[in-house]
Amino acid sequence: NWEDLNLDIVVGAMKERSFVPGELVFSQGSDGTSIFIVASGAFECYDEGTQEIVRRHQVGDLFGELAVILGEPRALSARSSFEGQGTLWELDEQFIDKFLVEKLRTDDTKTAVLSDEGYAAYVDG
């Protein structure tokens, strides 16, 4: 279960990245190679075509994980909010593959999250 994951290993693998207001984190359609946790500031996931902000992430929020787990291109672009600087903790694909995805692939959580109802609850949650 998830409690067995050594959190010291996860924290040690995180890279801190700082962003100026409006700076791009990743582009819609790019490969999902990292997941992000908001350490400070706010970040926006938006549609490049319409510029519509689909989701706003605050301190403690995680984003970018589905593209990595599913191996699909990013569905949206992400940037630091124009309101101020922001900092993210990044976990790269190599760490995720080694420690997290293999765990998820063997866990019933994947089935629950990726079912139509589970995904809707996860995204809305």
Image (cartoon, rainbow, N blue to C red):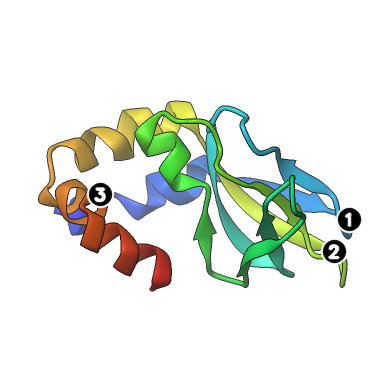
User: Please, what secondary structure does the residue beneath circle 3 have?
Assistant: helix
Q: Distance between the residues labelled 3 and 2?
A: 33 Å
Q: How far apart are marks 1 and 2 (CA)?
A: 5 Å
Identity of the amino acid at label 2? Answer: Gln
Query: Residue 55: which disc?
Result: none
**Label 1: which residue?**
20
**Label 3: which residue?**
114
- Residue at 30%, 36% in the rendered image: 101
Asked whether the residues under the numbered discs 3 and 2 touch, taking CB atoms below 8 Å apart as contact, a structural biologist would say no
**Residue 33 appears at what percent x and percent y?**
54, 31
Asked whether the residues under the numbered discs 1 and 3 touch, taking CB atoms below 8 Å apart as contact, a structural biologist would say no
| Number of callouts | 3
User: Please, what secondary structure does the residue beneath circle 2 have?
Assistant: loop
Q: Give the mark, 1 or 3, whose residue is nearer the N terminus.
A: 1
- Residue at 23%, 32% in the rendered image: 102
**Label 2: which residue?**
85
Identity of the amino acid at label 1? Answer: Val
Query: In the depicted view, which residue is nearer to us: 40 or 57?
Result: 57
Task: Determine crowd level at label 1: few under 14, some 14-19, many 20+ residues with C-alpha closer than 10 A.
Answer: some
Q: Is residue 103 left or right of residue 46?
A: left
Image vertical order of residue 100 relative to residue 98, above or below: below
Image vertical order of residue 72 relative to residue 62, above or below: above
Foreground label between 1 and 3? 3
Asked whether the residues under the numbered discs 1 and 2 touch, taking CB atoms below 8 Å apart as contact, a structural biologist would say yes
Image vertical order of residue 124 relative to residue 68, above or below: below
